[in-house]
Image (cartoon, rainbow, N blue to C red):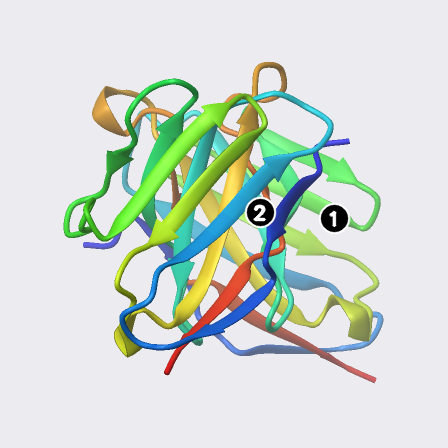
Amino acid sequence: GAVVSQHPSRVICKSGTSVKIECRSLDFQATTMFWYRQFPKKSLMLMATSNEGSKATYEQGVEKDKFLINHASLTLSTLTVTSAHPEDSSFYICSARGLAGVDGEQFFGPGTRLTVL
Amino acid sequence: QKEVEQNSGPLSVPEGAIASLNCTYSDRGSQSFFWYRQYSGKSPELIMSIYSNGDKEDGRFTAQLNKASQYVSLLIRDSQPSDSATYLCAVNHAGGTSYGKLTFGQGTILTVHP
């Protein structure tokens, strides 16, 4: 149980284009989903928290107009990187927290590696 | 001051030995603590969670929590080369605007050599 998928796993795009990343909880309903980014040899940096049916809460320093998050259902959240630039190249990982289960426990998707040329 | 601190390592142990990973945290009200394993190029995988003071064992893994000292550790017995990875300590915030969020340490790189 507690499986989270992400799509795509890897994407290469040109500077200026937008990229959408999907995060799905496959066998549980996720009341909250989190989006992280990770640079090489660094720890995870939380970008935003999204709750189903409400606006995402962004961490300080994260541009909400650049990183659009939609949590349309209890099993799907999307992150859209708008007008991507090379500095947006990173490993983006989502996680999900269910209705049941341990307080605070998050299950991670496999991640999406974004390369902006 | 970092909220969650880990020794970045690398920690190198021989196969079959006990690997000991340590983590301290600053938010005294934190209630939930997690250890994640992350292989290079992959996303984190939850391996242990602990909420009460004391030890919690799961197979070769034992998590230890001491809330008074704000300290959590992970012991890996009979270490195997496949345990070589980065181990992330994560702490669940107790309340306020950070409730439900996890704060991660910088991770400890573990290498188990044959």
Question: Would you say A19 lies left or right of A24 here?
Answer: left
Q: Position of residue A61 (x, y in %)?
A: 15, 52
For the residues beneath circles 2 and 1, the answer to whether they share a chain is: yes
Q: Quadrant of residue A8?
A: bottom right
Q: How many C-alpha atoms fall within 10 Å of the one at disc 1: few (<14), some, or many (≥20)?
A: some
The residue sitting at 18% across, 50% down in the picture is A63
Residue A15 sits above or below residue B56 on the image: below
Where is mark 1, residue-wise? Answer: B61
The residue sitting at 53% across, 78% down in the picture is B10
Q: Position of residue A87 (x, y in %)?
A: 27, 75
Viewer-proximal residue, B86 or B26? B86
Tell me the SS state at disc 1: strand
Q: As shown in the figure, which amino acid type bears the numbered disc 2?
A: Trp
Where is mark 2, residue-wise? Answer: B35
Residue B60 sits above or below residue A3 on the image: below
Q: Quadrant of residue B63?
A: top right
Quarter holding the N terminus of chain B is: bottom left
